[in-house]
Amino acid sequence: MKQKRDRSIDREIGARLRMLRVQRGLSQDKMAMDLGITFQMVQKYESGTCSFSSHRIVAICNILNTTPNELFKGLYAASNPHGQKLPLLSVNTTHAALQLEHLPLGVRGHIVSLIGEIHADAIGTK
């Protein structure tokens, strides 16, 4: 029996792709035209039902004025000595992190501390 493929990474990359496309004000039609594919294929990429080649990743990143490093940032740790499965970030978390990255370092520190306090309060460890 064929084992079902884990598409969690495809879904996360697709969600990031959609977020960047929307932030840049591009429609699925325009992106598809620039890539030379159908808008349905863009939908499949964004939903994670289809993965794409490294050649396509580079073309997508050029259109979105980003890099593959930014697209994949945070999905993998440089080393994971305990073999733990790393959590994937939701679109909202990724979006918040991207916005946070543009703030001054001191402000970021305060926001991270505030999030930590809210989390501790929410789970009752405060």
Image (cartoon, helix red, strand yellow):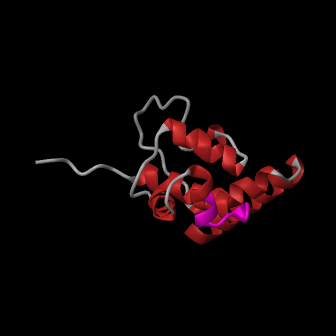
**Image quarter (top left, top right, bottom left or bottom right) of the C terminus:** bottom right
**Which residue: 55% across, 51% down?**
36
**Position of 63 relative to 41 (above/below):** above
In the image, taking residue 116 as reference, residue 35 lies left or right, namely: left
**Which residue: 72% across, 63% down?**
23
Q: Report x, y in % for residue 63.
A: 68, 49
Q: Nearer the viewer, residue 89 or 118?
A: 89
Q: Report x, y in % for residue 55.
A: 53, 37
**Which residue: 72% across, 65% down?**
25
In the image, taking residue 5 as reference, residue 51 lies left or right, namely: right
Q: Is residue 73 visible?
A: no
Q: Report x, y in % for residue 90.
A: 55, 60
Residue 27 on the magenta segment: yes
Q: Nearer the viewer, residue 112 or 75?
A: 75
Q: Is residue 28 visible?
A: yes
**Position of 66 relative to 33 (above/below):** above
**Which residue: 66% across, 57% down?**
20
Magenta-highlighted residues = 23-31
